Image (cartoon, grey):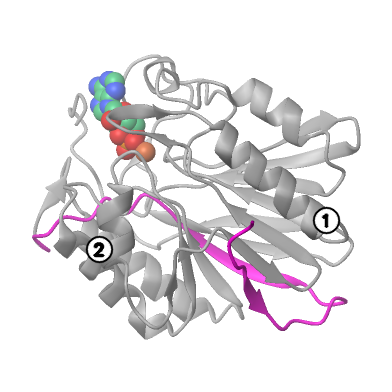
Amino acid sequence: MLKAAISYSISEAKSVRIVQVTDPHLFADPEAQLLGVNTAQSLGAVLNTISAVNYPAHFMLATGDISQDYSIESYHNFVNAIKPLDMPCHYLPGNHDDPRIMNLHMQGSQVFGQKRILAGNWQIIMLDSTVRGRPGGHMSEAELALIENAIAEEPNRHTLLVMHHNPVLAGCTWLDQHCMDNGETFIAQVAQYPQVKGLLWGHIHQNVETEHFGPHGAIKLMATPSTCIQFKPKSPYFALDALQPGYRLLELKSDGSILTNVYRVPGENFSPDKDAGGY
Ligand SMILES: Nc1ncnc2c1ncn2[C@@H]1O[C@@H]2COP(=O)(O)O[C@H]2[C@H]1O
Ligand SMILES: [Fe+2]
């Protein structure tokens, strides 16, 4: 039996518009910093930028690493921070989240932990790629079964799969040791479904937009900058980028195509400690 999906009444001929925020790494203490960046303030700046551009999103996706310290308060801080946007928010866990604490404390009238979202002629599936006690990820048989059943139940909808870990390598040696360890198999398996049009994740704190060419054509692969610190692309060793915190907008079109772009906060207010060697 599949758990209930959240359903939005958007006409099948219309686009579904989404804003994605990822990896806010919040602490209980709103003054705390991650490698020189106050993560509550950088999330606030991202949310202010989203408000200012007035993108008519139907909902938000928060793709994990909501917390940096596993605290109950970090989840309350996230829920309070997004309130002014007045937009539903669907979340999934990252390696820095404790899924149990997260589900208990990501509470609010606009916050949802359900795994399936139905909107327009799309189905969005929120997957758990985390492995207890490990920074890297794995897509479990249970999640693959969920995808299979969800698509069998809604075969006429285009499908977007959302997760925390990268199923393809980022090209940063230090970071790729923490990728989804069965990512290649996972992509090959989901590419068998003609419904699957895109995969979306966080974790690697950088913008990636590429494609996988499967038996049914191109599948869009997207990674999104963190709302706090950025990792330097293609770096063999741990290195931060001076790029500012960001977010992604997506338009899921009724023909199954995806229009998307990453945006960053203006200015240069969130510069991390350049000499940081990790966290
Ligand atoms: N210097 C480092 N070398 C290897 N891994 C690191 C280093 N610093 C942090 N990490 C881990 O790499 C992860 C990548 O992104 P996360 O935010 O999930 O959390 C990070 C840490 O768990
Ligand atoms: Fe992560």
Give SS at disc 1: loop
The residue at 64%/56% (across/down) is 1
Within-10-Å neighbours for mark 2: few <14, some 14–19, many 20+: many
Q: Is residue 174 left or right of residue 154?
A: left
Q: Which residues are magenta?
A: 1-30
Q: Are marks 1 and 2 in contact (CB under 8 Å)?
A: no
Q: Is residue 26 above or below residue 277?
A: below
Which numbered dot is residue 257? 1
Main secondary structure found in the magenta portion: loop
Residue 28 appears in the figure: yes
Q: Position of residue 50 (x, y in %)?
A: 47, 72
Q: Is residue 181 above or below residue 205?
A: above
Within-10-Å neighbours for mark 1: few <14, some 14–19, many 20+: some
The residue at 25%/55% (across/down) is 101
Q: CA distance from mark 1 to mark 2?
A: 33 Å
Residue hosting label 2:
75
The answer to which quarter of the image holds residue 86 is bottom left
Give the mark toward the camera: 1 or 2.
Answer: 2
The answer to which quarter of the image holds residue 106 is bottom left
Give the camera-side residue of 277 and 212.
Answer: 212
- Looking at the image, the residue that sits furthest to the front is 1
Which numbered dot is residue 51? none
The amino acid type, in three-letter code, at marker 1 is Ser
Q: Is mark 2 within 8 Å of ligand 2?
A: no
Location of the C terminus (image quadrant): top left
Based on the picture, tell me whether residue 15 belongs to the magenta stretch: yes
Give the camera-side residue of 165 and 101.
Answer: 101
